[in-house]
Amino acid sequence: MHTLLKSTYPHPAEPPCPCASASDRLGMVIAHEVNQPLAAIALHTAAARKWLCRAEPDIERALESLALIGAAGRQAGGIVRGMQRQAARQPLETADVPVDAAVQDALQALCWPMRKNGIAVDAFFGLGDCSIAANRVQLQQVVTNLLVNAVEALVAGGRERPLRIRVETRRHGGEVEVAVADNGPGIAPARHAQVVASLAGNADNPSNNSSGLGLAISASIVRAHGGRLWFEPGAPTGVCFRLRLPVRARAATTGRTFMKAFTT
């Protein structure tokens, strides 16, 4: 997992390899993706306890933490159910998903670890009520992976500058775009090829850390929805990941889905 969420639950130390069986790869993917909401449950439980154990309990903030615990539990359940459907070769469940709301939910789920690490978030939502045909749980998985990677990069890069993440949504022709940028050290030149391989769907050899596995999973989810995911250098520092998805096209239900990419 990543720095901000890794302390509570075990996680795969290495990404899937060519010699791993389908069940081994499935287990690695489940452990990687479910670990995020489970760790969030632990963090928000600690926060709720903190607010309740004060000399004057802060009931409002405790209730906010409890609501986030419920959301994280539903996210974990949705991830497992989605993977069960993929393993059974059942079609991807899609619905009209308001993108801004889904991104806001992902941000809200990570608010506590961001605050704990002193990271400021600049969020700009330009889609309004615009919806796309998508699986909401999987869309939030992608955004969560990008946000967690950004936090990890900022924490690892030191505190020479104020730590910031910028999230922006907008229309781009017949597509919606979600951008997640940080002002960390950026991707080292030696890792560029590994990150590109992860985004291109090289599931047998994503970069040798959990962020590489998360990117490979995210890119596969985006492709299954008819979109694309890429990165570009930040200005003046850091990195920006962008994903674009068609506004009204139905998500793909045939071919190489995100689950099959890691189990075949």
Image (tube, helix red, strand yellow):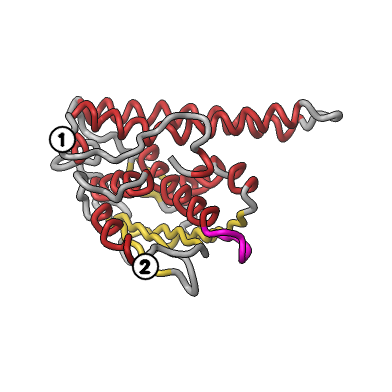
- Residue 146 at x, y = what percent? 42, 51
Quadrant that contains the N terminus: top left
**Residue at the disc numbered 2:** 232
Taking the image as shown, residue 201 lies to the left or right of residue 42, namely left
Dot 1 amino acid type? Cys
**Residue at the disc numbered 1:** 19
Instruction: Tell which of 246 and 110 is nearer to you.
Output: 110
Instruction: Please report the residue visible at 51 percent of the width from the left and 32 percent of the height from the top.
Output: 39
Q: Secondary structure at mark 1?
A: loop
Per the rendered image, the range of residues in magenta is: 157-164
Q: Secondary structure at mark 2?
A: strand
Instruction: Please report the residue visible at 43 percent of the width from the left and 29 percent of the height from the top.
Output: 10
Q: Main secondary structure of the magenta part?
A: loop
- Residue 190 at x, y = what percent? 32, 63
Q: Rate crowding at label 2 as few (under 14), some (14 to 19) or many (20 or more) other CA atoms within 10 Å.
A: few
Instruction: Please report the residue visible at 15 percent of the width from the left and 40 percent of the height from the top.
Output: 254
Find the distance from the CA under tag 1 to the CA under tag 2: 32 Å
Dot 2 amino acid type? Glu
| Quadrant of the rendered image containing residue 61 | top right
| Quadrant of the rendered image containing residue 79 | top left
Numbered disc in front, either 1 or 2: 1
Instruction: Tell which of 102 and 160 is nearer to you.
Output: 160
Would residue 123 be counted in the magenta stretch?
A: no
Quadrant that contains the C terminus: top left
Q: Are marks 1 and 2 in contact (CB under 8 Å)?
A: no
- Residue 237 at x, y = what percent? 49, 70
